[in-house]
Image (tube, helix red, strand yellow):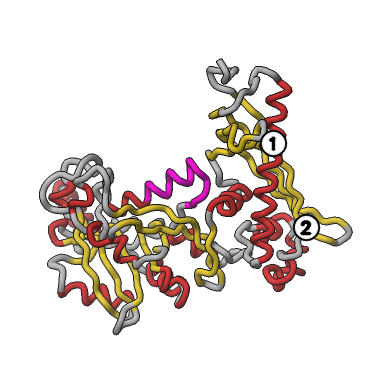
Amino acid sequence: MRRKCLLVFFMLVSLLLQGCWDKKELTDLALISAVGIDKGKDKRYEITFQIINPSSVAGGLQGGQGGERPPVTSFSVAGDNFTSVSRKASSEVSRRLYYAHTNVVIISEEVAKDEGIVKLLDVIDRDTEFRSTSTLVIASGTKAKDIVRTVTTIEKIPANKINKLLQFTEEQEGEHIKVGVQDVLQSLVSKSKHPMVPLIRLTGDKEKGKSMENVQTTSPSAVVKAGGMAVIKDGKFTKRLTGKIARGVLWIRGRVKNTHINMKWNHQEDAVTYDLIRQKTKVIPQLKNGKLKMAVHIDTEGDVGEVNTPIRLEDPKVLHQIEQKIEKKIKKQLEETVRFAQENKIDVLQFGDIVYQEEPDMWKKIKNHWNDQYFPQLDVDISVKSFVDRTGLKADPTM
C-alpha cells in the first residue's frame, strides 16, 4: 500500500514539472553583439547586425585575432520598423537572430537628429530578449553600419571595444559617460528630461576597417574612438558636449573619478599637472525670500603628477598656492559649464531632479516652466576645495 501511494505521489509531482518547451539550441542561434540603425534609402531604416562567429572567438575573447575567419559577421536589412527588419533578416541568415547578447545599440546622428531616439528605444525595451542594460551610443559623422562593420584591435568582438572604451574614458578622463538603454529611458521621464548619450566616431579608412587587414598591422587603417556626448532634448539629438564642458557636466553630477588639470606656473603654460584621485560633489537647493538658488560644492584630492618648471614642492606655501590655482581653474570650468547649459536651456546638470527631491513644494510651483524660465535664470553658487595629497618621489624638480 505504501509503495502504491509513493508511486501515485511521484506521478502527480511529475505533472507539475515544467519541460524544456521553449529550449533554444545554440547551433540554431545567431548571437548578435551589436545593432546599428541608419536611415534607409527606400525604406525608413537600414539596420545592421553584428553577429559573433563562435568558432573564431573560441579559446577566449581576449588576445589576438586567431584564425582566418573574422570574429564577427555583419549584414544590413532595410525596413520601415525594427520588427519587420528582424523578420526579413531570416532570408539572409541561416539561424534565428538572438538579441540576449547584444551589448551595444548604435544610432546614427542623422536618425537621432531627424526622428529622435524615443520610438527606437521603446521597441528595444519591449523586446523580452533585448537587454535594457545594453549600451546606447550615437554614431558621429559616420553611418552606424560603418562602426558596426569595423574590425577592432585588442578586443576580438568590436562591441566589447566600444563598451570598454566608454568605461575607461569615463574613469580616466571624465569627459564621457557610459549609459544603457534603460538609463536613457529613465532620464527622458525624469524632471530634467535631458539625457546624455555618448558619441562614437570612426577615423581613417572605413573600407579597410571592414577587413581583417585592419587588425593585422601595428597601425590600424580605421579606429573607433569616443567623440564626446550628445544631449537629447524633446527626444532628439540637439547639442554636442566635448572637452571641458563635458567634463564640467560630469563633475557637477559627481561622475568624475579620475582626470588631470594643467596649470600655469612661472609664466609657463601647463607647467604643473594635478592628477585627481577622488572628488565629492554636493548640490544643495536653497530658498531665500522665496527665491531658489543652487549651491554646488566640490571637494577634490589628488597628486602632483608632472612638473616642468623649477618649483619647491616641499614648501607648504607652494603647495597652498597650487591648491588655490586648482580651485580657481575648476571653478572657472564649472561656471562655463553652467553658463552653457543655461544659455541652451538644457538641464543636463539634473538640477530639476534635485529640486524635486529636496524642495517638492517649490517644484510644484515651477515645474511647468523649469526648462524655459527658471533654470536659465537660476543663481548658481560654486565653491571648490582642493587638496594636494602627494608630490611623488621627487620634491625638487631641478635636481
| Residue 164 on the magenta segment | yes
Q: Mark 2 or mark 1: name the one nearer the start of the chain.
A: 1
Q: In front: 115, or 272?
A: 272
Percent coordinates x, y for residue 148 in the rendering: 29, 61
Question: Quick one: which residue is furthest to the bottom in this view?
Answer: 42
Side (left or right) of 164 relative to 61: right
Q: In front: 203, or 170?
A: 203
Q: Is residue 23 visible?
A: no
Which quadrant of the structure image shows residue 330?
A: top right
Secondary structure under tag 1 reads: helix
Side (left or right) of 93 relative to 280: left
Q: Amino acid at mark 1?
A: Lys
Disc marking residue 325: 1
In the depicted structure, whether residue 148 falls above or below residue 283: below
Say which residue appears at 54% left-offset and 40% top-offset. 259
Question: Quick one: which residue is furthest to the front in this view?
Answer: 267
Side (left or right) of 20 relative to 229: left
Sort mark 1 into few (<14), some (14-19) or many (20+) by Cα contacts within 10 Å: some
What segment is highlighted magenta in the picture? 163-177
Disc marking residue 379: 2
Dot 2 and dot 1 residues touching (CB under 8 Å) = no
Percent coordinates x, y for residue 293 in the rendering: 78, 56
Say which residue appears at 78% left-offset and 57% top-offset. 379
Foreground label between 2 and 1: 1
Question: Quick one: which residue is furthest to the top in this view?
Answer: 399
